């Protein structure tokens, strides 16, 4: 696994999307992580140090995995570039059609219990 | 695990799941171009929430969820994603009425 800077990561991700057009899937995982081992974390805890967490992003296509991490300062910039990459490559999805009405009807039978909190 | 059919329910439950256990919850998206399918998954290794779609409009909704998770994960589970999700913020802007009426 290669830990990249956010920009090279996005470039690699773009090429993964390009390669995946004929077959295969692209996986992207987000996880909150301190990028430290458990031992290190425990040491820091006993020493009373604050553990810094970042958002770890991994992408996999076939047998290739790349990763990057963004901290609280860079995440907004990264998320907009990431959205641009997605928008440019998720072109196989269907545009609006009548199926969606059916989906909405099905949706009603679940989610009733919880109050939808808009974000 | 059965797919959740309602987007709002999926978002609600996945955020709850993350807040309950920020350190072991991950958010995965799988995109398969040749079949035009998109699958989103949120799991904490105990519970697993999945959402499947082939609709382009759901990709837009996903963008918002991406922002929510980026915010929660990089700033911490206490962060309020509403304050940084671009569009909502724009909608909320009109509160700035008294513009240019300083004295």
Image (tube, coloured by chain):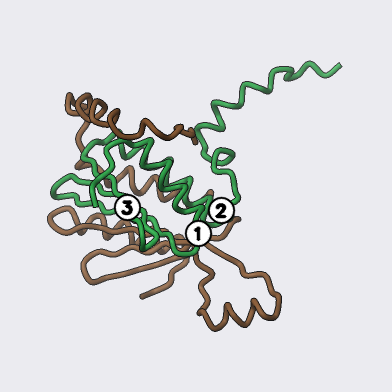
Marks 1 and 3, Cα distance to the nearest angstrom?
15 Å
Q: Assess disc 2: are there few (<14), some (14-19) or many (≥20) residues with their C-alpha within 10 Å of its C-alpha.
A: many
Residue labelled with disc 1: B22
Vertical position of residue A31 compared to residue A80: above or below: below
Residue labelled with disc 2: B77
Task: Name which of mark 3 and mark 2 comes first in the sequence.
Answer: 3
Chain ID, mark 1: B
Q: Assess disc 3: are there few (<14), some (14-19) or many (≥20) residues with their C-alpha within 10 Å of its C-alpha.
A: some
x 76%, y 19%: residue = B100
Chain letter for the brown colouring in the rendering: A
Q: Assess disc 1: are there few (<14), some (14-19) or many (≥20) residues with their C-alpha within 10 Å of its C-alpha.
A: some
Determine which of the numbered discs, if any, sits on residue B41 in the image. Answer: 3
x 51%, y 79%: residue = A38
Q: Are marks 1 and 3 on the same chain?
A: yes
Q: Position of residue A115 (x, y in %)?
A: 46, 32
Left or right, B76 with reference to A69: right
Tags 2 and 1 touching, CB below 8 Å: yes
Q: Residue furthest front?
A: A113
Vertical position of residue A10 compared to residue A109: above or below: below
């Amino acid at each position: 696994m290669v830990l990249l800077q956010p920009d090279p990561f996005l470039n690699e991700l773009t090429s993964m999307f390009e390669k995946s057009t004929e077959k295969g899937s692209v996986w992207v995982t987000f996880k909150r992580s301190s990028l430290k081992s458990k031992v290190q974390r425990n040491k820091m805890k006993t020493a009373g140090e604050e553990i810094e967490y970042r958002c770890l992003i991994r992408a996999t296509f076939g047998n290739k995995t790349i990763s990057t991490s963004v901290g609280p300062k860079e995440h907004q910039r990264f998320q907009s570039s990431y959205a641009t990459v997605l928008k440019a490559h998720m072109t196989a999805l269907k545009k609006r059609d009548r199926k969606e009405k059916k989906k909405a009807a099905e949706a009603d039978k679940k989610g009733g219990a919880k109050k939808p909190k808009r974000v | 695990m059965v797919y959740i059919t309602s987007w709002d329910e999926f978002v609600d439950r996945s955020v709850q799941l993350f807040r309950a256990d920020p350190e072991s919850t991950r958010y995965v998206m799988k995109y398969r171009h040749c079949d035009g399918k998109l699958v989103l998954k949120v799991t904490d290794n105990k519970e697993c929430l999945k959402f499947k779609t082939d609709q382009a409009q759901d990709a837009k909704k996903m963008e918002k969820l991406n922002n929510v998770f980026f915010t929660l994960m990089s700033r911490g589970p206490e962060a309020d994603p509403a304050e940084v999700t671009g569009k909502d913020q724009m909608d909320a802007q009109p509160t700035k009425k008294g513009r240019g009426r300083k004295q």
